[in-house]
Image (cartoon, rainbow, N blue to C red):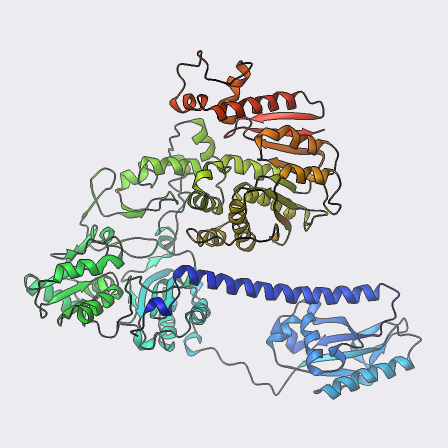
Amino acid sequence: MSTQISNLIPSNQELVQQRLQVAREKRAARTRSIQQIQERNMHLKNILHSNQTVPMYAVKVTVCDELRDELKLSGREKRGRVFFESQSDAVRSLKGLRFELHAFFRALRKGSFMLSAGYPLVEEDGTISSSKTVDDVLWKIESDQDVIDTFQKADSFFQDNTSTLKRPSIVIKVQKDPNAAPPPPPPAYLQNMPDPASSPTITMLSFYSFPPGGVANPEDFANLLRKAWKPFQALGRIYVAREGINAQMSVPTNVLDNFMACCQSIPELGSYMENGINIDPIPLTRDEFATAGTPAAGGEPAPPFMGLHVRVRRQIVADGLDESLDWQSAGYDMPPLEWHQKLKEEKDNLVLLDCRNTYETDVGRFEGAEPLGTENFRDSWAVLEDRLKDLPKDTPIYGYCTGGIRCVKVGAYVTQKMGFKNFTRLAGGIVAYDRTLQEEAPTEEPLFKGTNFVFDGRLGRPITEDSLGTCLTCGGETSLVSNCRNENCHKRMIQCENCRTSFLGTCSDACRHRLVRGTSVSITSRPEESKVSFKNLEDYSSGHSSPTPTVYKEIEFNTKSLIPSGSHMISGDAQGRLLAQLTSMTREGRVLELGTFTGYSTICLIEGAGNVAKITGQKGTRESGPFVLTMERDSKAFNVATAHVKAVAEHGLFEAGAEAICSFRGADVPSITSSTVSLLYEESVGVELRRVSDALAAVESIANGAEEDLSAFDLVFVDADKTRLLDYVEACLLNDRVLKKGGLIVVDNVLWKGLVLDASRHDSFSSASDDDDEDSDEETAELRRNRRARKLANKMHRFNAAIAQDKRVEVLVIPVRDGLSVIRKK
């Protein structure tokens, strides 16, 4: 495995894109299949309800009792009637017939069955019995010729019964094949396995494997692990790469032996799990497990793992090396008891390296160990080169880490790259040392002091009561490790219990402020004990509003990265939530947006339209139902917005959508050559992004009837050219082609940085006034000196004054962000 990694293995971002592409292709294939079946069914329905004389066969299909029970068929699937056109494959080949039956009796895909047919028993009123045949006579259907003969018999039977039958009919029976091979027995490790849900405790464990041949297809292997581990109700975070597997997991204790047997049966694990599976010595009760992790964003207790996440990565431990070393040759793997004795006797005669990162070594370490002092594991190599450069090559060097995997890479580097011949690593790491000492030498005092940082939601497991860390906030002694609860920071930190409570689990005043503004905060499970302090009403309002879906923060970050000069132009939390709420309250969820920018407000409007779709059950198109049409002039902004909206349309508003949006940050956003992009959100909201040279001209064109297939909107959001706002509103009020009666026009920036107040006080707010408020802040004073700001403030004031006097509308100006004017068309 000495080939250059960079030449063989895609980056993590590329792997994510590959996985998303595979998921998209699968969804598209399923959609095409469903669409084909729907089109076929609709075609037959149109024929049956029309006067067309297309020859068709009516087929009564029944499934035997044994298959019904085995496949747990629904009522619809147990029996039914299907129609075949006389020229279809279903009446000419066995494959075609089976395909049509599968389209109706879908569960039959899972079983092995045989087909037989018979003449239908016709009642006096022309009804065909669902299960009986004439004289109970059946013949087998085992070949294409049998299919052809069956439908020829149906033709003959019809000729003899034209007075009672509308079309040729036949009965087909689906029966379990008695000669079919029985389903394979479950693996030995699943036989007689207890119910995982009945286990009173959960065991935390970890393991890694570097199989000599690597993992040939990581994506397929990840799917295999998900399927193999599902019966155990196992949870955890597992990384799979070509070089191997790295896992941190939790398993119900009563099935732990079965789980270990399962892992042993998988070739890439088995004997290659160095030191076997690292098991925490003390299982957690289910109640302890439920609260052992880092609290959720709202402060609610959380478990160490929320699900089973098997993810494909470039490497199972990101090492930053240009080539993959021989992980099978990484020094001596010393058992924990031997390690313990060796450190007691000879720690002064060897170099003892703590191969973990600073946030780990700060809260716990072996006595006399030298931390590498790194923030990331990939930084270790330069530190090792510097620390060991003057040592003889036979110097005893000892290294340890949490579970042993990083020391495999350190050992391989020190021996293969630096030429040292006497490297020793702790087998199973600190986790194995702690367990072994408790189980085999309980009277021995641990040489590891403090807390062992672990890579699950617990973030630390105390081994001794020593507090070796220093609180980030107050400087006191502590060994508590956590992540800043501000999701945009998420900094790993050491913080004492008192500071964790007073700072709401954040690392600083700034992060605490953002947390309060962005989410509803509860720092304990008992709200009456939670005392959250708000500095102003804006903070209080944000703290008592529903959280904003995660994709919006990623859109903010992308906008700052890709179009930094306009990052202040996005709607923001409060305005975005208001737009989503207003759209949710419309009749059909039909919205026209003028000024897409990078898509923040667009997705808010789509979100609101989706809420309407959930209530009405209507699928949106240009003609009716939930539909969002957005227009943008700037090509770069249009490209970014299209990428954002596509990500949300494919992956939703939460974690998957946020990951998709995050994946192209810093990358080249695809250029959109077409002037129109059409999408479908949640299979219900039609979305059309349109690049235009003049949005006003496009709206006036709609008002003049140029787009006959486009129905009127419930809401128009105007965030376009501020000098022509009255023209935009006039186009919406001219007739009912753009905006319905009772519809809303929402105009942004109507308070224009607060300067409209100055514009209202002066006949012509064309220069900074001598009687400006002396208490004005510096930013406001600077704006007043800005000629363009004063000019736009004048125009905005004139717009506000004019629209307030228009008898065709009702107006409400809301001082949210830079001001919104909500205008209702009478």
Q: Is residue 68 above or below residue 410?
A: below
Place of residue 824 in the rendered image (x, y in percent of width and height, measured from the top left): 67, 30
Name the residue at 80% across, 82% down.
Answer: 151
Question: Which residue occupies the foreground of this view, 538 or 482?
Answer: 538
Numbered-mark total? 0
Percent x, y of residue 60? 77, 74
Is residue 821 shown left or right of residue 436?
Answer: right
Answer left or right for 226 relative to 702.
Answer: left
In this rendering, position of residue 684 left or right of residue 273: right
Q: Residue at x 52, y 29 (%)?
A: 816
Residue 514 position, x and y percent, is: 39, 37
With respect to residue 632, does 751 lie above or below? above
Q: Residue visible at 25% across and 75% down?
A: 328
Residue 445 shows in this picture: no
Give the side of residue 733 with respect to residue 483, left or right.
right
| Quadrant in which the N terminus is drawn | bottom left
Q: Depth check: 513 or 340 in front?
A: 513
Query: For the view shown, which residue lies furthest in the right direction?
Result: 163
Q: Quadrant of residue 141?
A: bottom right
Which sits in the foreground, 418 or 150? 418
Of residues 600 and 588, the one nearer the viewer is 600
Give the quarter of the figure containing the C terminus: top right
Residue 672 location, x and y as percent? 55, 53
Residue 314 sits in quarter? bottom left
Q: Is residue 36 visible?
A: yes
